[in-house]
Amino acid sequence: MKIKTVQDAIELLKILNAPPRLLMHHKLVVEAAQKLVKEIKSRFNLKFDANLVLIGAALHDCGKIVYPQEMTGSGNQHESTGEQMLLSKGISPEIARFCRTHAQWAETDVTLEDLLVSLADKLWKGCRDKALESRVINHIAQESNLPTCKVFVEADLVFETIALEGPTRLLRSVMDTGFEPYHNSLSEGFSKIVIYIPFYTKMSR
């Protein structure tokens, strides 16, 4: 099976019987990824596969179809399981790898595409990860031959703009599906607004 677009990826999730809240999660991460790649493309003289980033964002957590408890709790079994699931369906390794690299970006050699999927998976809910962002910034600076400080100023503004929309996306992830929130992420995603939802207690990987 060939996946050429985000819509192809979403249709695959449906075929694999992904629950509504998992579908919504992927759509919201794609939304953040679209804004991220658009800004990175427009601000820096950089070549990367933006469509691959969006497809990766649309499939990165598909392993949680097998491990649904990891949608609301911690756990990493979905990572390798998701990669193998996609490979078994004939999806290319280039795409399947995002199931693993979105969470393991600090532990392995990764491309800018891998890093941007990982970052979108943070920013969608308003989470800022300094270590991940630093790696993205350093990668951009190296590939674009721009001073790191200049890249930081531009990229930090992009990251913050996307992250500020995180609380709205988190609410949509609840309201649009009728389920409890995909992530227990009040402390990270809702840090910029005054709101309390009791079951948002911790962040799952």
Image (cartoon, rainbow, N blue to C red):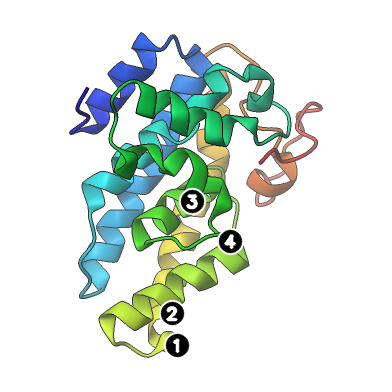
Question: In this rendering, is residue 156 above or below 197?
Answer: below
Q: In which quarter of the image is residue 2?
A: top left
Per the rendering, the mark at residue 149 is 1
Amino acid type, mark 4: Ala
- The crowding category of the residue bearing disc 3, from other C-alpha atoms within 10 Å (few below 14, some 14 to 19, many at least 20), is many
Q: Earlier in the sequence, mark 4 or mark 3?
A: 4
Which marked residue is nearer to the observer: mark 1 or mark 2? 1
Residue 20 left/right relative to 140: right
Residue 100 in picture, x, y percent from top left = 51, 43
Q: Distance between the residues labelled 2 and 4?
A: 23 Å
Give 168 or 81, whichever is nearer the viewer: 81
Which marked residue is nearer to the observer: mark 3 or mark 1? 3
Per the rendering, the mark at residue 125 is none
Can residue 172 be seen at all in this image of the molecule?
Answer: no
**What is the secondary structure assignment of the residue under circle 2?**
helix
**Residue at 77% from the left image edge and 39% from the top image edge:** 202
Residue 12 in picture, x, y percent from top left = 32, 18
Residue 70 in picture, x, y percent from top left = 66, 26
On the image, numbered disc 4 is attached to which residue? 106
Question: In this rendering, is residue 201 above or below 134?
Answer: above
On the image, numbered disc 3 is attached to which residue? 118
Amino acid type, mark 3: Ser
Please say if the residues under marks 4 and 3 sit with CB atoms less than 8 Å apart.
Answer: no
**What is the secondary structure assignment of the residue under circle 4?**
loop
Q: How far apart are marks 1 and 4 (CA)?
A: 22 Å
Amino acid type, mark 1: Cys
On the image, numbered disc 2 is attached to which residue? 153
Give 38 or 46, whichever is nearer the viewer: 46
- The crowding category of the residue bearing disc 4, from other C-alpha atoms within 10 Å (few below 14, some 14 to 19, many at least 20), is few
